[in-house]
Image (cartoon, grey):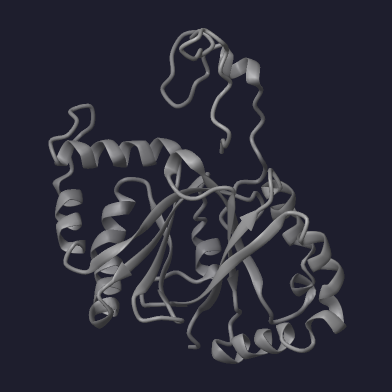
Amino acid sequence: MARSLFLHEVVDIVGQGQYDYMEHLWKDPVLRMPDMFNLQGSFYVCAPGGGRWPQVVNIWDCGDRGWEGWAANVDRLNLKRRKAFYGDWWDVAAQWRSGGFDRLLGGVPGSPTTAEIAARGIRGTIFVHEILEVDPTRRLEFLDLVATRRVPLMADHGHQVTGIYEVLGNLHEVVLVWATTIADQTELRMARDAAWGLDDAGSADDRLRQWELTAAQYVRGGLSQLMTPLPRTVYGPPDWEDASLDQWLAGRAGPGATGASPAPTDLTGADVTGPDNVC
């Protein structure tokens, strides 16, 4: 079976254009072409989860033909791009994005294909996105440990893996993606803190501490972000959720909130509506 290959895009967004840009992806000409890139997921980086903003992360599936499918997509985006079909789409997209960074990813054993994600019904309302720098001589060894040890551990805490990838443009990066919910991500973080003796609010799971000790033998750096998925993608929700500012001012302040809370104020007593960037 051909290897699963993916294009991983980190897109720098202009202003508050993330939502318009993500919806514009549905008009990309490639989605009308057989055996070409398929949009697996598009995500807006959620500021409280860490990471640079405003940014959008896109994951495109290169198709079922492995390197032959990759080659066909390179040919489409090479000399043929503007002349054939991409001028108008790129011109519109340019109003919402200013640049970005691409990675070619290769799936490893234990990383589900797009078809397997759909067949298993894996969905999330928030995703954990990890770009890690690892020992180049032990990269595949580390990813095998992720597949065999970390995947079942994360599943016990409501996190389903959607991608275990090596970056094919260098020797030191890997990308991991997990589908989950805010409630399950909160529980995982509390269980981790409790395992290290940093918080007694959660139920300690010492396996989380042991995994961090194991990973430290391989990982040299990187980042972890939370991402909000574009609805109607393979593993995204059916639509955006409805909400109003009045709900939040009345006390609907997030998971586990109870009772009414006054509108937040700064040190001068002025109303504060929140940070510049919200999910």
Front-most of residues 42 and 220? 220
Q: Residue at x 19, y 30 (%)?
A: 199
Q: Residue 38 at x, y = what percent?
A: 66, 71
Is 222 drawn above or below residue 263 in the view shown?
below
Q: Is residue 25 visible?
A: yes
Q: Residue 9 at x, y = what percent?
A: 57, 66
Is 163 drawn above or below residue 43 in the view shown?
below
Disc tally is 0
Horizontal side of 97 relative to 154 (left or right) equals: right
Q: Residue at x 60, y 78 (%)?
A: 62
Quarter of the picture holding the C terminus: top right
Q: Residue 115 at x, y = what percent?
A: 55, 69
In which image quadrant can residue 7 be found? bottom right
Q: Residue at x 49, y 21 (%)?
A: 253
Q: Is residue 110 visible?
A: no
Q: Residue at x 37, y 56 (%)?
A: 223
In which image quadrant can residue 78 be found? bottom right
**Which residue is outermost to the front?**
268
Horizontal side of 60 relative to 192 (left or right) equals: right
Is 150 drawn above or below residue 30 in the view shown?
above
Is 182 drawn above or below residue 88 in the view shown?
above
